[in-house]
Amino acid sequence: MNTKLLPLAFLECNDEEPIEGITRFMKLIFLAQREKLDQDFYRYEPGQYGPYSKSLYDDIDRLESEGFIRRRDEPTGDKKSDKQTYELTEKGERTLHRARELPGNEFPEAVDGLEAVKSQYNEMDLWELLEHVYGEYPEMAKNSVLDISTGRAV
């Protein structure tokens, strides 16, 4: 699968259920790579909020600016940040449909793993998701600014 299509395929999974926040989006793809996919599409390093991939962040940003992904920003009442929700657009759907028709595509195998990860973790509270990621992959938490046990920044 083309690396650029992975975020689109992930958004399409589970009846196009949206993904709330870039942190969650990044952790879901990290977990899919570690637990379900046979290859690492993105390279991760320990970041301030656990596993971080600059190339994935850039791809999501680019896919949004080019109209394949829609990001909705909703006020949270917290003046510091809005809630971001990521969704697949019709342009993104068409792109995935065309990609499936190409010879040698690997969608069927990859999508099963993506759906399983999204089903298991997308509805999880963000702190609970981070606790899971930090617990299973402690090497990715070494630069974290979060104290997961208290739910606060350090």
Image (cartoon, grey):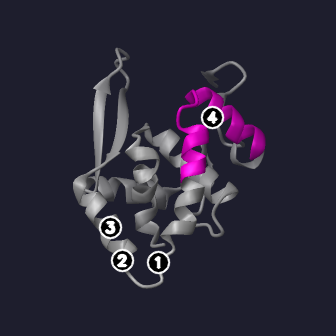
Residue 25 percent location from the top left of the image? 48, 45
Say whether marks 3 and 1 touch (CB < 8 Å). Answer: no
- Quick check: 122 above or below 114? above
Q: Considering only order in the chain, which callout, 1 or 3, is on the residue closer to the N terminus? A: 3
- Tell me the residue at 62%/34% (across/down): 129
Q: Is residue 128 shown in magenta?
A: yes
Residue 65 percent location from the top left of the image? 25, 54
**Closer mark to the observer between disc 4 and disc 3:** 3
Q: Could you give the CA–CA distance between mark 2 and mark 4, rounded to whole angstroms?
A: 35 Å
Residue identified by numbered label 3: 97
Say whether marks 2 and 3 touch (CB < 8 Å). Answer: yes
Report the amino acid beneath label 4: Leu
Residue 146 percent location from the top left of the image? 63, 30
Element type at marker 2? Answer: loop
Residue identified by numbered label 2: 101
Q: Could you give the CA–CA distance between mark 4 and mark 1, rounded to whole angstroms?
A: 31 Å
Q: Considering only order in the chain, which callout, 1 or 4, is on the residue closer to the N terminus? A: 1
Element type at marker 1? Answer: loop
Residue identified by numbered label 4: 129
Q: Which of 18 and 152 is in front in this view?
A: 18
Report the amino acid beneath label 3: His
**Mark 2 surroundings within 10 Å by alpha-carbon count, few (fewer than 14), some (14 through 19), many (20 or more):** few
Magenta range is 115-137
Residue identified by numbered label 1: 105
Say whether marks 4 and 3 touch (CB < 8 Å). Answer: no
Say whether marks 1 and 2 touch (CB < 8 Å). Answer: yes
Element type at marker 3? Answer: helix
- Tell me the residue at 51%/74% (across/down): 106
